[in-house]
Image: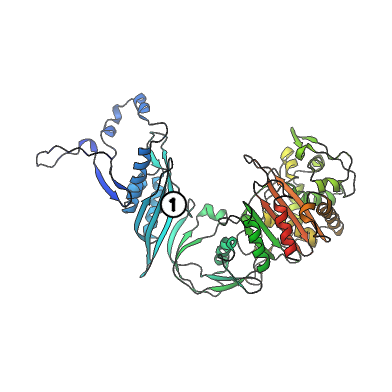
């Protein structure tokens, strides 16, 4: 802080502002007192400053502790005092900061803001927020934690707050806004298939699902809106199918009821399974109907099981095999070696651990998940064959599923050359999530695609997606043969031990750039149950996601 020098007394006439510099002293709870200043003589002398001198004056190098502290205090104190223009000027995007901070008071009805700075770590400054939200005579306290990061502006090196909407509230994405008022959608009480009440406290994975159910069915379920502070998603968030989120309820509305297809037994088991692993997600469904019986994620902030977009690795070989069988390019018992290496369009593909099958059948390569037994079919395929198979038989990649809450329907883009070859083994541009891969296993089990759903279409008369054609009974039998072989003798045998007969499975491991271990995938069916799971950065699917899926298939009977 230092001591402020005494300004010499001048004559009583109005003093001139020297160099445009004005010293402003402000104080903020939790921050202390400091001076805010800027502009000044340097700006007046700009016309005579040489380019070389300007370059010399640009501050570079790591931010000092003083720069981080004063920048953070400048921003936080101005925000606390409601001085939006000053707070926004301390950021590197004053226009966006002005809009959001203005809405914070005007639209979100947040007042009495107290910001308390925490312990700084480098350029990152955590802080806590205490405020009051008021609407038409109803008030409630609001408390939460956030953080900001200080950066240098490139053109002059000035330290500024790196602006993102999450600075204002951690649940905000850029483009989102905060609004307090009568909720656009009344609350809902979600029920499981047996009529039991579903809550996030009971099933932590279902927080995002409950948000989605309210957004979709709140206005039609018979409830009455309350008053709340909520995040209203912007265009970019909506394109990612993120739901609006309630942050604070000022007064309760009257909820309507929405019945789901979730099984309380399987949902509880799924929650338990993912809680024991890092970054795990799983979906269980019924092949004969498409009903979703359970969905769970280790992380509760994003529903990877429904909305994830990940390379599915070798579980995609189910779709690839369907295409190969339909084209009569192979059959389960056909002789088909799996070479250690295979070159395609300038790329050299390797099997896991450089394994090979010199004399064997296609079924053996499927069971061992031997990559090159699939990639070496690429010269006999057109670029769009896999895309058409995924869309026409499995209903994937058409962006038309209506499960009752936001979901991603998979993507199998048309690719050429080596990328097309990589797509055959679930790499390249192919993207899926456990919901998609559970649906793939269900389609094999049932012989026909039934779009997965969490809420019956009879509730809102929505139209479920359909596939344009159905695999033949011969193709279904061939797929069941290779998946049963994998479950009994192949890479899925350890996880599926004791669950036969009437079952089938496929493992997968998807390499991810910058990740030491691959994502482990596993999808399987048993009777009229199907499930799929992924453990990100976990390793081979048979060892990581396999036990999760197998346990749930056993629980479901």
Q: Residue 136 vs residue 353: left or right?
A: left
Q: Nearer the viewer, residue 205 or 403?
A: 205
Category of crowding for the residue at label 1, using alpha-carbon neighbours closer than 10 angstroms: few (below 14), some (14–19), many (at least 20): some
The residue lying at 71 percent from left, 63 percent from top is 285
Residue 180 screen position, x and y as percent: 42, 63
- Visual colour scheme: rainbow
Q: Which residue is mark 1?
A: 146
Say how many tags the image has: 1
Give above or below for 82 relative to 13.
below
Q: Residue 400 vs residue 117: left or right?
A: right
Give above or below for 257 relative to 468.
below
Q: Quadrant of the C terminus?
A: bottom right
Q: Nearer the viewer, residue 350 or 57?
A: 350
Residue 339 screen position, x and y as percent: 83, 37
Q: Quadrant of residue 215?
A: bottom right
Residue 1 screen position, x and y as percent: 28, 40
Q: Nearer the viewer, residue 144 or 469?
A: 144
Give above or below for 546 relative to 160.
below
The residue lying at 79 percent from left, 64 percent from top is 527
Residue 438 screen position, x and y as percent: 72, 57
The residue lying at 66 percent from left, 47 percent from top is 538
Q: Residue 53 vs residue 407: left or right?
A: left
């Amino acid at each position: 802080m230092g001591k402020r020098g005494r300004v010499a007394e001048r004559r009583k006439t109005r003093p001139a502002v020297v160099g445009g510099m004005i010293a402003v002293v402000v104080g903020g709870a939790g921050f202390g007192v400091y001076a805010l200043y800027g502009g000044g003589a340097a700006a007046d002398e700009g016309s005579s400053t040489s380019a070389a001198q300007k370059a010399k004056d640009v501050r570079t190098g790591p931010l000092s502790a003083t720069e981080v502290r004063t920048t953070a205090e400048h921003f936080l104190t101005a925000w606390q005092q409601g001085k939006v223009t000053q707070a926004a000027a301390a950021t590197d995007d004053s226009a966006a900061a002005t809009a959001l901070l203005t809405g914070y008071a005007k639209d979100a009805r947040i007042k009495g803001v107290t910001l308390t700075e925490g312990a700084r770590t480098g350029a990152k400054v955590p802080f806590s927020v205490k405020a009051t939200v008021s609407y038409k005579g109803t008030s409630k306290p609001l408390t939460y934690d956030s953080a900001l990061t200080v950066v240098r502006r490139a053109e002059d090196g000035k330290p500024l707050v790196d602006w993102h909407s999450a600075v204002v509230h951690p649940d905000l994405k850029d483009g989102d806004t905060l609004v307090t008022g009568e909720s656009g959608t009344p609350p809902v009480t979600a029920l499981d298939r047996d009529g039991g009440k579903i809550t996030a406290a009971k099933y932590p994975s279902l927080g995002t699902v409950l948000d989605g159910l309210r957004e979709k069915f709140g206005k039609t379920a018979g409830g009455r809106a309350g008053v709340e502070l909520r995040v209203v998603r912007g265009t970019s968030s909506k394109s990612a199918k993120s739901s609006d989120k309630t942050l604070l309820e000022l007064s309760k509305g009257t909820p309507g009821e929405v019945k789901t297809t979730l099984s309380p037994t399987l949902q509880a088991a799924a929650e338990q399974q993912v809680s024991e692993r890092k970054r795990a997600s799983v979906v269980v469904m019924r092949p004969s109907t498409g009903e979703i019986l359970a969905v769970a994620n280790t992380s509760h902030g994003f529903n990877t099981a429904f909305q994830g977009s990940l390379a599915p690795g070798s579980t995609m070989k189910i779709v690839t095999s369907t295409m190969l069988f339909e084209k009569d390019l192979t059959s389960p018992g056909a002789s088909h070696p799996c070479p250690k290496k295979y070159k395609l369009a300038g790329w050299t593909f390797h099997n896991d651990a450089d394994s090979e099958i010199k004399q064997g059948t296609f079924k053996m390569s499927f069971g061992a998940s031997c990559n090159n037994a699939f990639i070496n079919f690429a010269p006999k395929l057109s670029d769009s064959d896999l895309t058409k198979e995924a869309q026409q038989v499995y209903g994937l990649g058409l962006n038309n599923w209506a499960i009752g809450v936001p979901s991603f329907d998979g993507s199998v883009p048309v690719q050429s050359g080596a990328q097309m070859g990589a797509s055959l083994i679930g790499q390249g541009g192919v993207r899926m999530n456990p919901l998609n891969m559970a649906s793939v296993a269900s389609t094999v089990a049932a012989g026909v695609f039934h779009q997965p759903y969490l809420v019956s279409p009879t509730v809102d008369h929505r139209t479920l997606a359909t596939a344009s054609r159905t695999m033949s009974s011969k193709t279904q039998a061939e797929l069941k043969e290779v998946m049963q072989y994998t479950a009994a003798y192949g890479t899925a045998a350890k996880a599926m031990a004791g669950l036969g007969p009437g079952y089938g499975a496929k493992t997968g491991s998807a390499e991810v750039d910058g990740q030491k271990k691959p994502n482990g995938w596993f999808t399987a069916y048993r009777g009229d149950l199907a499930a799929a799971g992924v453990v990100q950065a976990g390793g081979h699917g048979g060892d990581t996601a396999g036990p999760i899926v197998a346990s749930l298939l056993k629980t479901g009977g």
